[in-house]
Image (tube, rainbow, N blue to C red):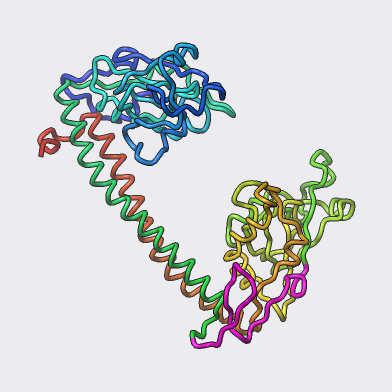
Amino acid sequence: MSEFHFLGSAQIPKGWELRRLKHVGTVLSGTGFPHDYQGNEDGEFPFLKVSDLSAPGSEKWVSYAANTVDREMAKELGASIVPENSIIYAKIGAALLLNKRRLLSRPSCIDNNMSAFVPKIVLPEWALWWMTILDFSEYVNPGAIPSFTEGQQKELPFLVPPLKTQRRIADYLDRETARIDALIAEKEKMLALLEEKRTALISSKVTRGLNPDAPMKPSGLDWLGDIPAHWGILPIKYVAQVGNGSTPAVDNPEYWGGGGLPWLNSSVVNDRYVAGAVRRVTPLALKECHLPIIEPPVVLMGITGQGKTRGKVTVLTFKATLNQHLAFIKPMKRILSAEYLRYVLVMAYPFLRSESESGGSTKGAITCDQIAGFRIPCPSIEEQYEIVGSIKEDEEKFTGLYKEVSSSLMLLKERRAALITAAVTGQLDPEEMAA
């Protein structure tokens, strides 16, 4: 792929030049920021980290950082004082691939995971918009930890129109992207409200049933509140079997492959239903590693880790086994519906997370004993089926609305990106931008 592929078949407008970053400004590298120097909020210069690129209110300009340094501290650290109107960005790691660029509104220092471009013969606002269309992933050193050397940064392509044109385009993009961003924010708010309403509706039906006039009683559980008077409250172990699995030795080929049983890991809880398995285990593994053979329908729960998977649940609809990071909950068929149980546990997710933390220190695990002893609302199996059916009807409606809003949101983001590219590559009519 050509490094100038963003131009497509278009011609560079007359009076524009295609140059390199090193020809239009300088690149400054950041400096290590030892912990002993951190925590000062009264220094003259903000000391910016990669996380500051994502701070609220820093979508274009950055002026605030959690840490500051004075001039003497900057000198001790060997830190360059990056002038205002410079463009800062991540130069290593996953943050580099996010392609976030920001303008400095005041002189600052940056840490050694960042670089700064100091414009010399181009307008800072133009430089920011131009660099917005550059996908750094196309220029960096590949590998487990992507990185971007100063030399590579200096060779980035840079399109330079006349100064008056730079100003016109920058002002135009400021206006137009602000308008589009307002529409994007509106759509994102709509999505959040839809999700909030969907969650509230599910919660109401799971905890109160479908009859709004049913007499209520206290459940005795803080996370649950009142429930219909005719419902029961039972520990899961009274209405389901609970257990977990293990991981056979990964270096033993006799345990893996073939047409064996699907073997599941905790990534499956990110979907409502388990779609499939990446790996399969042999009958020998099932026997020697004492793996459970799970018959559907079953609810699976992630039980370890600090990420979101701990406490999340999914429904398994095919025969499988699993590793030690998942628990299975096999409902008694005539007493508990797997679908209903999933909805209950989705609602209980925040409580399950907090219960797996002891006195504020994260244990990072939910035990099978905790799951077995966890008390849940138990209407009759017939009422469970009615509740599940009603919730699914509601979810179909919400899914349609969600897809509609998400589609319009995606189109707005695509329109924004296309507009920026067209403007900074000289494909828009100057009169249109002046209007």
Q: Position of residue 270 (x, y in %)?
A: 59, 55
Give the residue at x 59% y 29%: 144
Give the residue at x 49% y 66%: 199
Q: Position of residue 427 (x, y in %)?
A: 21, 33
Closest to the observer: 140 or 342? 342
Look at the picture and state if 338 lies above or below 185: below
384 vs 212, left or right, is right
Q: Position of residue 55 (x, y in %)?
A: 41, 38
Is residue 235 shown to the viewer in this render?
A: yes
In the image, which residues are magenta? 213-241
- 167 is within the stretch colored magenta: no
Look at the picture and state if 19 lies above or below 399: above
Is residue 1 shown to the viewer in this render?
A: no
Give the residue at x 73% y 58%: 327
Q: Which image quadrant is residue 336 in? A: bottom right
Q: Position of residue 170 (x, y in %)?
A: 21, 31
**Residue sitting farthest toward the front:** 42
Look at the picture and state if 398 lies above or below 36: below
177 vs 376, left or right, is left
108 vs 94, left or right, is left
Image quarter in which the C terminus is found: top left
Q: Which image quadrant is residue 430 in? A: top left
Image quarter in which the N terminus is found: top left
- 219 is within the stretch colored magenta: yes
**Number of numbered labels in the structure image:** 0
103 vs 53, left or right, is left
Closest to the observer: 403 or 304? 304
Closest to the observer: 41 or 8? 41
Look at the picture and state if 269 lies above or below 59: below
Q: Which image quadrant is residue 101 in? A: top left
Closest to the observer: 177 or 365? 365
